[in-house]
Image (tube, rainbow, N blue to C red):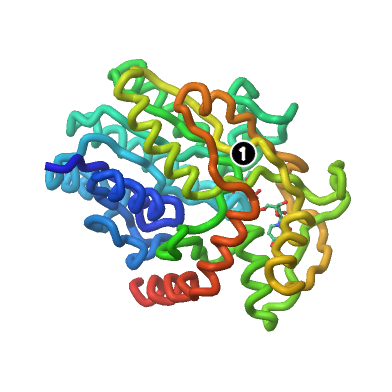
Amino acid sequence: MKPHVLVCGGAGYIGAHMCKRLARAGVVPVTFDSLVTGHRNAVQWGPLEIGDLLHPGDLSAVFARYPIQSVLHFAARSLVGESVREPALYLRNNVTGTLNLLDAMRSAGVGKLVFSSTAAVYGNPLYTPIDEAHPAQPINPYGLSKWLAEQQIRAYCEAYGLRAVCLRYFNAAGADADGETGEAHEPETHLIPNIIRAALTPSLGPVKLFGNDYPTPDGTCVRDYIHVEDLAEAHLLALDYMAGQPGFHVFNLGTGQGNSVAEVLAQCQALCAGAPASEVQPRRPGDPATLVASAALAQAALGWTPRHGLDGILRSALRWHQGSGATAATARSTADR
Ligand code: UFG
């Protein structure tokens, strides 16, 4: 029988890429997703179980139905601005939801977990590139929720022998090389899809650049964009890593290369015949000036090396949006609800 891995949030952006990668590796990805923000038609590589992390009965039913060997946990609310307005939603979903998952894993005797964490746990960086020794000082409820979830996981590792890897992503971006899945958030708040949407649909108006007075070389924020396929690869390596390494582990996932908002825009414009136009807006609250990873630890421990740079990220994202997969995914998902 093929190995089975539970993918919580497998109908979401990163989770769906993960399912495709698992299937290619000969693993059955069992998606557990509420479809509140995920898309039914993103689940193409294994079974879909619709359920909610806040309903423990939904989880125990899935563990009873499939011979799950390990869990990848992507299911979370992930918008910083929304988390400031609705901290209860974030703490309940991301912290209590993770606790329910840990308890269900314990009851089912499943002992390996890879958790989607974020650079948001670091808050405003004290230095860059940011390594895992940097203090965790989240500045918004989203980052706090991920940090608290990590600490719960750590406690379960120490007390109950769980093995876990927390992967702190920097800026996830890009799409599947075959155009089968990609980013389809509604509303969309992220820079790269917003630029591409504005380039492909001029009626959306100019893309907004939030702040050009940051202490960076061109005044716009600098981020470390990491291809979603490179993220999926790191999760696969993390599963292997846990086979030989007990305990709790944390790794940053980024390229170590920072690009400013203005650079990303210029590179998109070069791919899109000069479009879109842009307009400078005031700073977006809560944006640190620079977030760049040191991923040396992931490279040394997991043997992970990102294969894609910004150009590959932008080209794959553009293909996905041109193929209208993004629009179709959003429309069908809205119809599902
Ligand atoms: N930006 C724009 N215009 C847009 C969208 C974004 O100028 O239309 C700017 C933002 O102000 C920021 C940069 O582009 O400077 C990147 O913004 P994104 O929204 O694409 O991504 P974030 O850097 O806000 O998000 C990342 C991770 C989150 C994490 C956060 C921590 O995706 O998981 O960093 O700050 F919480």
Q: Report the front residue among 113 and 18.
A: 18
Q: Position of residue 248 (x, y in %)?
A: 41, 21
The answer as to whether callout 1 falls within 8 Å of ligand 1 is no
Q: Do we see residue 89 in this rendering?
A: no
> Residue placed farthest to the bottom in the image?
203
Which quadrant of the rendered structure holds the C terminus?
Answer: bottom left
Residue located at (64% from left, 51% from top): 310
Residue at the spot x=66%, y=35% of the render? 256
The front one of 87 and 265 is 265
Relative horizontal placement of residue 33, taking residue 12 as reference (left or right): left
Q: Position of residue 73 (x, y in %)?
A: 37, 42
What secondary structure is marked by label 1?
loop
Question: What residue would you read off at disc 1?
Answer: 255
Q: Does 10 appear above or below 44?
A: above
Quarter the N terminus occupies = top left
Q: In this view, does 143 lie to the left or right of 21?
A: right
Question: Is residue 186 in view from this perspective?
Answer: yes
**Which image quarter: residue 240?**
top left
Residue type at mark 1 is Thr
